[in-house]
Amino acid sequence: MRRRLREDDGQLLLLILVYAAIAIALVVVVVDVSKLFLYRRALSGAADAAALAASQSPDEGQLLTVGVGSSLPLSQDSVEVAVDRYVANARLSDRFPGLTWTVTTDGAIATVEFEAPVKLPFTGAVLDGGSARITVDASAESPVTP
């Protein structure tokens, strides 16, 4: 009986199970964080392109009456229309389901903010809903130089 208590049979199996659990946890974290990073990068690129499209869409009424100064005259309506058109043409709603955006301008610089939920591969399978919201913004000035 005493000999049986001192034996260490099965200790290696326990060690392998602990290391396997750690490895699985690391894979889960790395995959979810990678998905967040890549999604944010793609959304940021789309916001940059939308801001550029908005900055190149002057308010035609101001353009005809005031002319071109150091930058193209932008209005809230002109930049909103440009971003809406860009989102539709680039099919961003297909690439980023649940995408919402806001557009602002100070008359020379167009600022676009995109927000979209991202479903996480592992966390989404374990937790109900398992998603995060990503928010990015980008600004662009009209390309006219004096």
Image: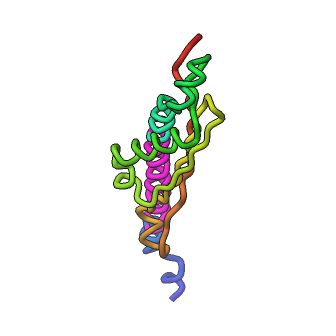
**Residue at the (61%, 17%) spot, across then down:** 69
Q: Please tell me which residue lies in front, 143 or 3.
A: 143
Q: Main secondary structure of the magenta part?
A: helix
Q: Position of residue 41 (x, y in %)?
A: 47, 42
Q: Is residue 125 above or below residue 137?
A: below
**Magenta span of residues:** 17-45
The image quadrant where one finds the C terminus is top right
Q: Please tell me which residue lies in front, 100 or 85.
A: 85
Residue 71 inside the magenta-drawn segment: no
Q: Position of residue 136 (x, y in %)?
A: 56, 45
Q: Please tell me which residue lies in front, 103 or 60.
A: 60
Viewed as shown, does residue 140 lie left or right of 27?
right
Residue extending farthest to the right is 106
Q: Position of residue 17 (x, y in %)?
A: 44, 68
Is residue 141 visible to us here? no
Residue extending farthest to the bottom is 1
Is residue 94 visible to us here? yes
Residue extending farthest to the top is 146
**Residue at the (45%, 68%) spot, across then down:** 124
Viewed as shown, does residue 46 lie left or right of 72?
left
Residue 32 inside the magenta-drawn segment: yes
